[in-house]
Image (cartoon, helix red, strand yellow):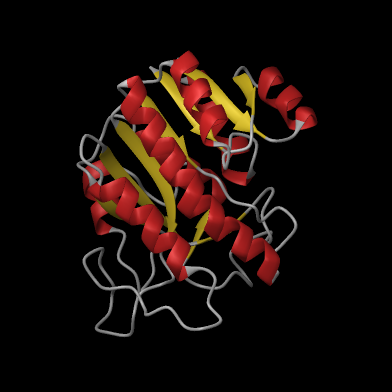
Amino acid sequence: MRVFLAGGAGAIGRQLVPMLVGAGHRVFGTTRDVARAEWLHSAGAEPVVLDALDADAVRNAIAAAQPQAVIHQLTDLAAGFAPEQLRATARLREVGTRNLVEAMALAGAHRLIAQSGAWLYADGPLPHGERDPMREQGPDDPVIGGIAELERLTLATPGIDGLVMRYGFLYGPGTAYAGPSGTPPPRVHVAAAARAAMLALDRGSPGAYNVVDDDPAVSNARARAELNWTPESR
């Protein structure tokens, strides 16, 4: 399968690219950084250097790649979780997702797998399933608005078969947390998060999926049943 991976050299991308290449997929991985493009090439992907906020660049790249599926792992959190990084990530989730969806429509691509979060549910009965509402956006909350727009574009755009991966807080290589100890719940290993995105290429019906370690507060039952995913899927 031809796969366009937006955010191909990020924490999840560095786990996901070797999985996709090893499974025989042709991968087009995006980055804004020329040095990271070299890593993509060394890992077997075809690097695409672009800014996801540039609609023309995204449209041209997807038109050239002609992917059957797009995986959206764009964030701006490599430098940490400071407010400016969270705001930049929210913009990527709003504008970047819109650019990807519009480019997919022009190129005739239909399958979109996008990164979201499983720690944003409103208070209510536990464990939270994917139908539970998210919390309301507060005045100093730069996260919810971006997540809500990403999910709306992914799940409600006509012609797009969208699957949202609601990841727990990531731990493992390239993340802020070395292991599960000290990582806030819900949590998931970065390689298991990547594996869920790969499985979603050809499994699962459109909708949201909690991709988390077994947790009393957030259910991963749908990902287990429809994607055949487990937290040990690395």
Instruction: Indicate the quadrant where residue 125 lies.
Output: bottom left
**Looking at the picture, how far across and down is residue 42, in whole percent?**
71, 19
Tell me where residue 133 sits by quadrant: bottom left
User: Quadrant location of residue 213?
Assistant: bottom left
| Quadrant of the snapshot with the N terminus | top left
The image shows residue 177, relative to residue 195, as above or below, that is below
Q: Can you name the residue that lies furthest to the right here?
A: 35
x 49%, y 53%: residue: 93
Q: Is residue 217 left or right of residue 183?
A: left
Q: Nearer the viewer, residue 179 or 49?
A: 49
Side of 219 relative to 16 (left or right):
left
- 171 left or right of 206 in image: right
Name the spot of residue 59 as percent of width and height, x first: 47, 27
Please report the residue visible at 37 percent of the width from the left and 38 percent of the height from the top. Answer: 101
The one nearer the camera, 158 or 214, is 158
- Image position of 222 (left or right of 80): left
Outermost residue toward the front in this view:
56
Please say whether residue 138 is visible from this viewpoint: yes
* Image vertical order of residue 3 relative to residue 162, above or below: above
Relative vertical location of residue 123 with respect to residue 119 in this rendering, above or below: below
Q: Position of residue 129 (x, y in %)?
A: 25, 67
Residue 196 appears in the figure: no
- Total number of numbered discs in the rendering: 0
Residue 152: % across, % down: 31, 55
The residue sitting at 22% across, 44% down in the picture is: 206
